[in-house]
Image (cartoon, rainbow, N blue to C red):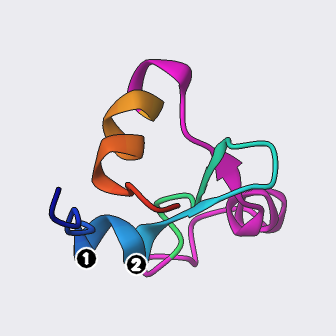
Amino acid sequence: MPKIKTHRGAAKRFRVTGSGKIKRSRAYKKHILTKKSANRKRRLVQPDLVSTADSARVHRMLPYG
């Protein structure tokens, strides 16, 4: 069998944790930050996990992750 290509866009956006869950970064932290509270901006910096509904799709894009 040939090797499976990794989806390069997904590889730049997601990381697989040691337990096999998929870590992602949060949106809304790039610009228009003046109207967002400091508490909200601090929460947006923290990584989050991909939902279980989407994790199978992301795992297919990251075959060796």
Residue at which label 1 appears:
8
Q: Is residue 34 magenta?
A: yes
The residue lying toward the viewer, choosing from 29 and 60, is: 60
Residue at which label 2 appears:
12
Magenta region, residue range? 30-54
The answer to which image quadrant residue 21 occupies is: top right
On-image quarter of the N terminus: bottom left
Q: Which mark is residue 34?
A: none
The residue lying toward the viewer, choosing from 37 and 44, is: 44
Q: Distance between the residues labelled 2 and 1?
A: 6 Å
Residue 12 position within the rendered picture, expressed as x and y whole percent measured from the top left: 40, 78
Q: Does the magenta stretch include residue 22?
A: no
Q: Is mark 1 on a helix, strand or loop?
A: helix
Mark 1 residue type: Arg
The residue lying toward the viewer, choosing from 56 and 41, is: 56
Horizontal relation, residue 15 to residue 14: left or right: right
Residue 62 position within the rendered picture, expressed as x and y whole percent measured from the top left: 38, 57
The answer to which image quadrant residue 33 occupies is: bottom right
Q: Residue at x 56, y 67 (%)?
A: 35
Residue 29 position within the rendered picture, expressed as x and y whole percent measured from the top left: 53, 72
Picture layout, residue 2 above or below residue 60: below
